[in-house]
């Protein structure tokens, strides 16, 4: 299998303001969000990053999506460095996270065209893709309704569709089902599996065990910014359930802290 | 191929022109508001001065027959009264029954005829005019009556004339400036100041929303995740904002310009009339280029502040100090004497634009200074663009909380 994503020694440290120092009950001026993280994802698989809140999942994904730069280490997306050629990387990935918002004023139809233009998608390809994706997610009926007037679930579906205008080979989803109702969540997870079947690579972050068990081929567990285990889901869950494996590793690492 | 900057430019304009409410508040309302307010103000001021058209009621004591000729104008209505009634008439002045009460000395006419500039005189005749300053009509009657008496006095003791005009045609014979120059000087006094402040405030009302607003709402991140280079996203935004600011500024400017006749009222007629007809097509062309380069600089500077700010509110606050600087520089130039000659003055941002506009309006701008202004504005905008790109590439600035 082709190694399409190779993360090696990724680290990221944030400065803490005095207010944050108090909140975190620490006198240190910096917080290491991600520490020397390495893993690989292969073509046509769904890779899950599992970890509690604040473990560094989102920071990792943001570095891979070139929104922020790593302090050290690098990641190669289909052979292209996120540090060296972020613009090339952006052509290859689709990134979806709750912090990427769509302008309330515009309609899904306009936004799809706008982001297609930003990705230099030819008009005929764009129209075909739009019909297909809008149909699949039921956006077609709301194509001319301003984002401001859409329901939360519909907004998220539009965000999802907009992140895929350029039909990327690698799709990075931060907490893909967060805040979605059960029906929409199922539509999204089914779609992730469909993407995988079409040969795409999907990287998701989550703290929901069932989601990992349901869709992921491989999983990496992150605690305190470090990868504690990274293997095929099958191998990890050979003896114990994923939940048990996670808590064993978590307490082993955190020890008396909890 | 679709250029990223152009795609962003189109999107920004679609946002602007697609929003009727925004369009109304930024383009139609400023000009309309200024026009209505200034016109109402101007008309009110002129109608106050126009009280002269009404008829003044004047109580006169001992007024010589012959003097009535000088007041043959229909706007004076005289009532002859006795000196003994003076106290009663003073009362009636405050009741606005009369506008003036004029008391001439007895034998006033005889004293005028006997007047000889070289002869020694024991006493000088005194005309007493009682008026009521709390009434505008009475004040106006007072000044107009005094004016006519002054003329009579000058006529009696006429030693020499100053700029005596025999007929209407001679009115402008002593002023060697052409009408175009007079008009130009007036224009160069207030138009650059108006243009600069209006342009700045329209930039300041649009740019923070487009940059800090998108940052605050998290919509800019969605654009930054696309392969379009950041400097192209910025360029698209800057150009779109410049177009919008220009339209908004133009609206305010038209509002002011069209209400000028009403605001200046009679003054407009006495100076021979303001008119844009004296300017050539090239004058207007250069004016537009100067304005365009200035607006671009304004938008760039305000965008930098907006990018550095965390919220629209913070950006609007940061923008104020520069507004004050722009206003002060523009106001100061109102009282300067024409455009500066040396080219190095035209390297100073804001000041160079004001000076260039003064030069264009007063017909004495050196081409080298015009070019210096435009080039330095473009250069400063380019430097600003570079800083802005740095800011857009800085994750703490763009995504920091």
Image: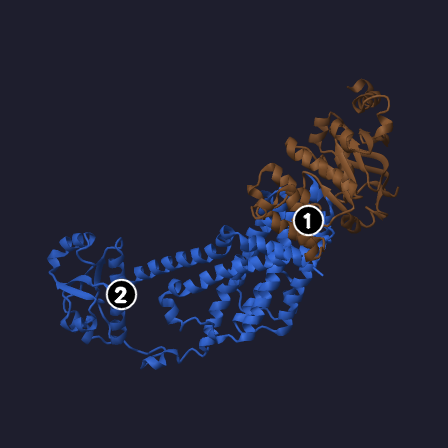
Residue B41 to residue A209: above or below: below
Residue B99 to residue A16: above or below: below
Residue appearing at x 20%, y 70% in the figure: B71
Do residues under tags 1 and 2 come within 8 Å of each other at their CB atoms? no
Q: How many numbered badges does the structure rendering display?
A: 2
Image-quadrant location for residue B381 = bottom right
Please report, as a chain letter, where disc 1 is located.
B
Q: Nearer the viewer, residue A50 or B123?
A: A50
Q: Callout 1 environment at 10 Å: few (<14), some (14 to 19), or many (20+)? A: many
Residue B263 to residue A244: above or below: below
Judged from the image, the secondary structure of the residue bearing numbered disc 2 is helix
Q: Which residue is mark 2?
A: B144
Residue appearing at x 27%, y 57% in the figure: B136
Please report, as a chain letter, where disc 2 is located.
B
Colour scheme of the picture: by chain
Q: Do we see residue A207 in this rendering?
A: no
- Left or right of B143: which side holds B108? left
Image-quadrant location for residue B275 = bottom left
Give the image location of residue A12, x and y in percent. Answer: 80, 37
Tell me the quadrant of the picture where the N terminus of chain B can be found: bottom right
Residue B349: mark:
none
Seen from this angle, which residue lies furthest right?
A: A1
Residue B223: mark:
1
Give the image location of residue A24, x and y in percent. Answer: 73, 27
Judged from the image, the secondary structure of the residue bearing numbered disc 1 is helix
The blue one among the chains is B
Give the image location of residue A223, x and y in percent. Answer: 80, 28
Residue appearing at x 77%, y 39% in the figure: A61
The brown one among the chains is A
First-in-chain label (1 vs 2): 2
Both on one chain, marks 1 and 2? yes
């Amino acid at each position: 299998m082709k190694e399409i994503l190779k993360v090696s020694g990724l680290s990221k440290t944030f400065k803490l303001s005095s207010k944050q120092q108090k909140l975190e009950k620490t006198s240190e001026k910096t917080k290491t969000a991600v520490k020397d993280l390495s893993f690989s994802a292969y073509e046509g698989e769904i890779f899950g990053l599992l970890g509690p809140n604040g473990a560094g999942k989102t920071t990792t994904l943001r570095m891979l999506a070139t929104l922020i730069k790593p302090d050290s280490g690098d990641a190669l997306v289909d052979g292209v460095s996120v540090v060296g050629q972020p613009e090339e990387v952006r052509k290859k990935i689709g990134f979806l996270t709750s912090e990427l918002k769509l302008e309330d004023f515009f309609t899904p139809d306009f936004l799809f065209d706008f982001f297609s233009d930003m990705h230099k998608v030819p008009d005929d390809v764009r129209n075909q893709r739009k019909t297909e994706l809008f149909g699949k997610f039921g956006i077609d009926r709301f194509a001319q309704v301003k984002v401001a007037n859409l329901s939360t679930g519909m907004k998220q579906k539009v965000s999802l569709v907009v992140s895929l205008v350029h039909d990327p080979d690698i799709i990075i989803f931060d907490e893909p089902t967060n805040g979605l109702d059960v029906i929409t969540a199922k539509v999204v997870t089914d779609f992730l599996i469909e993407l995988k079947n079409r040969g795409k690579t999907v990287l998701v972050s989550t703290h929901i065990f069932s989601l990992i068990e349901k869709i992921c081929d491989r999983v990496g567990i992150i605690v305190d910014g470090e990868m504690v285990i990274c293997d095929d889901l099958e191998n990890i869950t050979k003896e114990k359930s994923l939940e048990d494996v996670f808590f064993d590793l978590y307490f082993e690492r955190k020890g008396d802290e909890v | 191929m679709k250029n990223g900057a152009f795609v962003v430019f189109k999107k920004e304009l679609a946002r602007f022109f697609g929003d009727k409410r925004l369009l109304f508040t930024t383009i139609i309302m400023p000009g309309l508001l200024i026009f209505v307010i200034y016109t109402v103000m101007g008309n009110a001021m002129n109608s106050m001065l126009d009280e002269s058209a009404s008829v003044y009621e004047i109580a006169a004591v001992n007024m010589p027959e012959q003097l009535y000729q000088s007041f043959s104008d229909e706007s004076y209505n005289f009532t002859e009264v006795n000196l003994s009634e003076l106290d009663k008439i003073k009362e009636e002045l405050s009741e606005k029954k009369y506008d003036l009460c004029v008391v001439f000395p007895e034998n006033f006419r005889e004293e005028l005829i006997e007047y000889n500039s070289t002869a020694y005189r024991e006493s000088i005749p005194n005309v007493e005019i009682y008026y009521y300053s709390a009434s505008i009509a009475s004040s106006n009657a007072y000044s107009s009556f005094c004016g006519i008496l002054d003329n009579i006095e000058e006529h009696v003791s006429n030693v020499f004339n100053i700029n005596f005009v025999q007929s209407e045609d001679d009115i402008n014979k002593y002023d060697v400036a052409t009408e175009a120059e007079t008009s130009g000087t007036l224009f160069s006094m207030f138009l650059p100041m108006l243009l600069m402040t209006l342009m700045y405030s329209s930039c300041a009302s649009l740019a923070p929303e487009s940059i800090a607003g998108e940052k605050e709402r998290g919509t800019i991140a969605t654009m930054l995740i696309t392969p379009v280079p950041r400097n192209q996203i910025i360029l698209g935004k800057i150009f779109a904002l410049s177009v919008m600011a220009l339209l908004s500024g133009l609206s305010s400017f038209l509002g002011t310009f069209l209400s000028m006749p009403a605001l200046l009222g009679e003054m407009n007629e006495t100076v021979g009339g303001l008119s844009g007809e004296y300017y050539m097509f090239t004058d207007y062309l250069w004016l537009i280029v100067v304005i365009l380069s200035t607006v671009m600089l304004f938008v760039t500077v305000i965008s930098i502040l907006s990018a550095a700010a965390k919220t629209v509110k913070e950006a609007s606050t940061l923008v104020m100090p520069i507004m004050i600087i722009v206003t002060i520089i523009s106001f100061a130039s109102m009282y300067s004497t024409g455009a500066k000659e040396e080219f190095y003055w035209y390297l100073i941002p804001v000041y160079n634009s004001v000076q260039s506009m003064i030069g264009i309006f007063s017909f004495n701008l050196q081409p080298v200074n015009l070019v210096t202004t435009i080039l330095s504005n473009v250069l400063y905008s380019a430097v600003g663009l570079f800083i802005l790109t740095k800011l857009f590439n800085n994750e703490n600035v763009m995504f920091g909380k």
